[in-house]
Image (tube, rainbow, N blue to C red):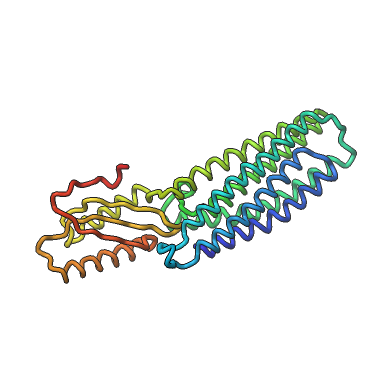
Amino acid sequence: MAGDSKKTVCIALAANVVVGAVKFVGAALTGSAALFAEGAQSVSDTLNEVFLLTSLVRSDRPPDRRHQFGYGMERFFWSLLAAVGILVGGAGFSGIEAYRAFTSHSAPGPRYYLIAYASLGLVLLAEGTSWVRAVRQVRREAHRAGRGLVEHIRLSSDPSVKTVAGEDSVAMIGVVVAGAGIGLHQLTGVGWWEGVASAVIAGLLVVTAVLLGRDVKGLLIGEAVHPQLNRQLHEFLSAHPAVDRVVDLRTMQIGADKVLLAARVDLGSALNSDEVELASADIDRGINQRWPEVTDVFLDATRTDEPVRDPTVA
């Protein structure tokens, strides 16, 4: 999974470098505000891919004495920086270009539209390559998880692929919006249509950054797994012959594909110490076989009069 994510991010990085160069060359030759806004988005996206690659490399480090559950949550930190980069870099510069288009009254040169459309065509081809790769990976992951595509994007704990898919989707829409702004400029002779396009691109980037940042925030502060998985784990423990009842069950996402499970269980009173040890090992093995992402399992035997906590209620 991490290897697929690295390939997806590397393809997105290469595409953004090519796309950014094309956009800025086209913008320099034409002075188009829409192309400048698109170029700013590509610079932001390129920086974000560097953040995401850093997160994938650093989060794969094994546990050590200071970080005994590993570095999986570092992927969330760098993904948050990527969301901030989208907001500050892409949306901020696009907003500036929108203002410039509304206040500038220069007439376009004779090659303006030809260069602008050719640049957008090349951009669409490069962005499309990265977008197809990201969507294919998300579909594979959704199929493995038994979810629909939209549901998986909403629930996935891997922010790197989610960020790439979000960026590329917005980039594809942004190319269409930029082309529409340039086309309306050509048809009407009114340059502020490109300002409108730049403002729309800025708005799209703001929405993308806020949504990605909201998801990563929940993971950074210790988000539990989806309630459906919580219920399944609770049912698995409750059905084990050595367990009389599950008193409390708590989970936390400690990496993109790593989950910590802590449960307080009331074990059968007739069990001796050896049988308790065998039951604990059997539970741990059964959970790991059925849910490999649950990498750390902690069971705590408790009193029979302890009140039961519903694992699906916060």
Identify which residue is drawn at 57% across, 46% down.
83
Q: Is residue 243 above or below residue 37?
A: below
Identify which residue is drawn at 41% across, 62% down.
69
Identify which residue is drawn at 90% across, 39% down.
110
Q: Is residue 221 left or right of residue 230?
A: right
Q: Is residue 239 above or below residue 187?
A: below
Q: Closer to the camera, 69 or 11?
A: 69
Q: Closer to the camera, 35 or 129?
A: 35
Identify which residue is drawn at 81% across, 46% down.
26
Residue 237 rendering spot, x and y as whole percentages: 24, 57
Q: Is residue 53 above or below residue 109?
A: below
Count of picture labels = 0
Q: Is residue 92 above or below residue 4?
A: above
Q: Residue furthest front?
A: 66
Q: Closer to the camera, 162 or 152?
A: 162
Q: Closer to the camera, 181 or 28?
A: 28
Residue 29 rendering spot, x and y as whole percentages: 85, 45
Quarter of the figure with residue 184: top right
Q: Residue furthest bottom?
A: 274
Q: Is residue 27 left or right of residue 171?
A: right
Q: Residue furthest right?
A: 110
Quarter of the figure with residue 255: bottom left
State the quadrant of the C terminus. Answer: top left
Residue 7 rendering spot, x and y as whole percentages: 59, 62
Residue 47 rendering spot, x and y as whole percentages: 65, 53
